[in-house]
Image (cartoon, grey):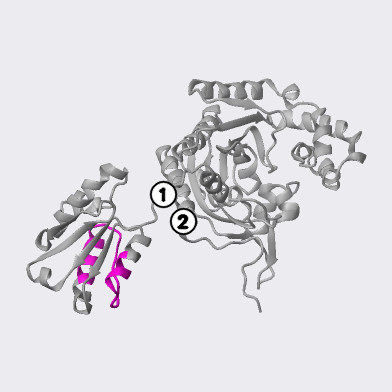
């Protein structure tokens, strides 16, 4: 038996794990600036949640879901995306019944799709996203787009292109779908098998087809803007004018439809180009949706949101050298001189950890040279050398592993001496140590 990982899944450790965590934590921090709160929904939902929520016509429902019968013969699905689960939770918990609208949630975690594994795309992958529900306003749409853009700027991205379109209201979309159906019916014999299905299920999906010949045919298709109701047209331009106010550049893309059936009105994608000019395509997608809350048993309630694939974003950041300074190292490595100093070193290690410094020490005897090598591999900033003779005098040697400077510190004033040493290097490398601020606030 070969115990390898399941195709399309991957183990994440070391720098990669730190990178994924970093992307999610920056995005979470920005979402909180905008007044969003965290929501965690189960990985497993009844299949109907996604079939009803995501739309029978979407590729996800048709081909990509991990669906199986549980022991009670109920059809369950591992979530392929988060929005339907978040909306199901809003309905199940009657969160819509609050006066405090809009509801604003962010989420982060794994999703599962049975698709062809390729660069930065896995069958189990991590998503971060937000949903804002209960307010039908161009400002809500703009707020979510601004949040996504600010998140990417905070991660260090410079070259981003925002593509935006409107799918109009139900009436506009119905008229547009009829026009598309009429247009594509004349060409369908030359198009791929998927497009044959899409023609009947949802002709909008054809605009999203990745087959080159089909894309050529789609270029001649009618455009949404010619079928928009006045209300949808006005709403779209309200959203764009807010983006203009904040000097966000965008490109109106008539063929942008997004891959899920629940979208209406504004839809958008953020595309990124790496420093070397490599086009990563869309790293973020989202938009406004209308009937989703109702489809899952709640009242008529609009929403808007976006999602990003965390692995893809981290991979692009790696290409752009935005992760080079990401800290994976420790602050302090405590070195006992001789076996009899192991206990003392362990005490000092625990003391430093309680002050909020990342600290390690050998747990069994180790040669002095080997300890220095280990400290270096772990990226330690300082080494604390604990010898018998010094400890009797109440001191230890602290060595800056970057500058190789070494000085004596008093163990009676351990906290002050460590704080002073770390404060002295904060300016040099721009990193702040992790001293425990909560304790200070509580006046301990």
Query: Left or right: where does residue 86 sit relative to residue 15?
Result: right
On residue 15, the disc is 2
Residue at (43%, 40%) from the top-left corner? 30
Q: Quadrant of residue 195?
A: top right
If the image is split into quadrants, where does the C terminus sit? bottom left
Q: Position of residue 405 (x, y in %)?
A: 21, 53
Secondary element type, mark 2? helix
Q: Position of residue 2 (x, y in %)?
A: 65, 76
Q: Is residue 305 above or below residue 347?
A: above
Q: Is residue 169 above or below residue 373?
A: above
**What's drawn in magenta, residue-wise?**
345-372
Q: Position of residue 386 (x, y in %)?
A: 18, 68
Marks 2 and 1 sit apart, C-alpha to C-alpha, by: 8 Å
Residue at (49%, 43%) from the top-left corner? 321
Q: Position of residue 212 (x, y in %)?
A: 80, 39
Residue at (80%, 29%) from the top-left corner? 219
Depth order, front residue of 329/161: 329
On residue 326, the disc is 1
Q: Is residue 326 above or below residue 246?
A: below
On residue 385, the disc is none
Q: Label 2: how many residues lie within 10 Å, few (<14), some (14-19) or many (20+)? A: some
């Amino acid at each position: 038996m070969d115990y390898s990982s399941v195709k399309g899944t991957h183990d994440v450790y070391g720098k990669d794990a730190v990178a994924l965590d970093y992307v999610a934590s920056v995005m979470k921090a920005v979402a909180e600036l905008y007044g969003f709160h965290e929501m965690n929904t189960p990985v497993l939902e009844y299949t109907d949640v996604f079939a009803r929520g995501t739309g029978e016509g979407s590729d996800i429902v048709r081909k990509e879901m991990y669906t199986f019968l549980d022991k009670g013969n109920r059809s369950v699905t591992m979530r392929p995306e988060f929005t339907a689960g978040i909306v199901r939770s809003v309905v199940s918990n009657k969160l819509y019944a609050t006066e405090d609208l809009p509801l604003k949630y962010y989420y982060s975690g794994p999703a599962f799709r049975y698709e062809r594994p390729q660069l930065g795309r896995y069958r189990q992958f991590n998503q971060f996203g937000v949903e804002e529900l209960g307010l039908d306003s161009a400002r809500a749409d703009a707020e979510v787009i601004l949040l996504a853009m600010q998140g990417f700027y905070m991660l260090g991205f410079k070259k981003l292109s925002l593509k935006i379109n409107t799918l109009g209201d139900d009436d506009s979309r119905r008229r547009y779908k009829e026009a598309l159906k009429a247009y594509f019916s004349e060409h369908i014999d030359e198009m791929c098998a998927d497009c044959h299905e899409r023609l009947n299920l949802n002709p909008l999906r054809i605009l999203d087809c990745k087959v080159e010949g089909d894309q050529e045919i789609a270029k001649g298709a009618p455009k949404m803007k010619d079928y928009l109701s006045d209300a949808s047209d006005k709403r779209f331009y309200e959203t764009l004018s807010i983006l203009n106010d904040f000097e966000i550049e965008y490109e109106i893309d008539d063929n942008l439809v997004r891959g899920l059936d629940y979208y209406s009105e504004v839809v958008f994608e953020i595309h990124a180009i790496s420093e070397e000019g490599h086009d990563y395509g869309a790293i973020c997608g989202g938009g406004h949706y209308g009937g989703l809350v109702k489809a899952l048993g709640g009242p008529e309630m609009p929403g808007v949101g976006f999602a990003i694939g965390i692995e893809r974003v981290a991979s692009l950041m790696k290409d752009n050298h935005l992760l080079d300074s990401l800290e994976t190292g420790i602050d302090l490595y405590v070195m006992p001189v001789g076996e009899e100093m192991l206990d003392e070193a362990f005490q000092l290690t625990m003391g430093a950890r309680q002050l909020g410094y990342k600290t390690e020490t050998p747990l069994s005897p180790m040669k002095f040279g080997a300890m220095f090598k280990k400290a270096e591999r772990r990226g330690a900033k300082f080494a604390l050398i604990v010898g018998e003779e010094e400890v009797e005098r109440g001191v230890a040697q602290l060595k800056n592993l970057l500058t190789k400077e070494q000085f004596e510190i008093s163990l009676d004033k351990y906290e002050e001496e460590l704080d002073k040493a770390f404060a002295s290097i904060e300016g040099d490398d721009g990193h702040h140590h992790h001293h425990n601020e909560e304790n200070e606030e509580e006046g301990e």
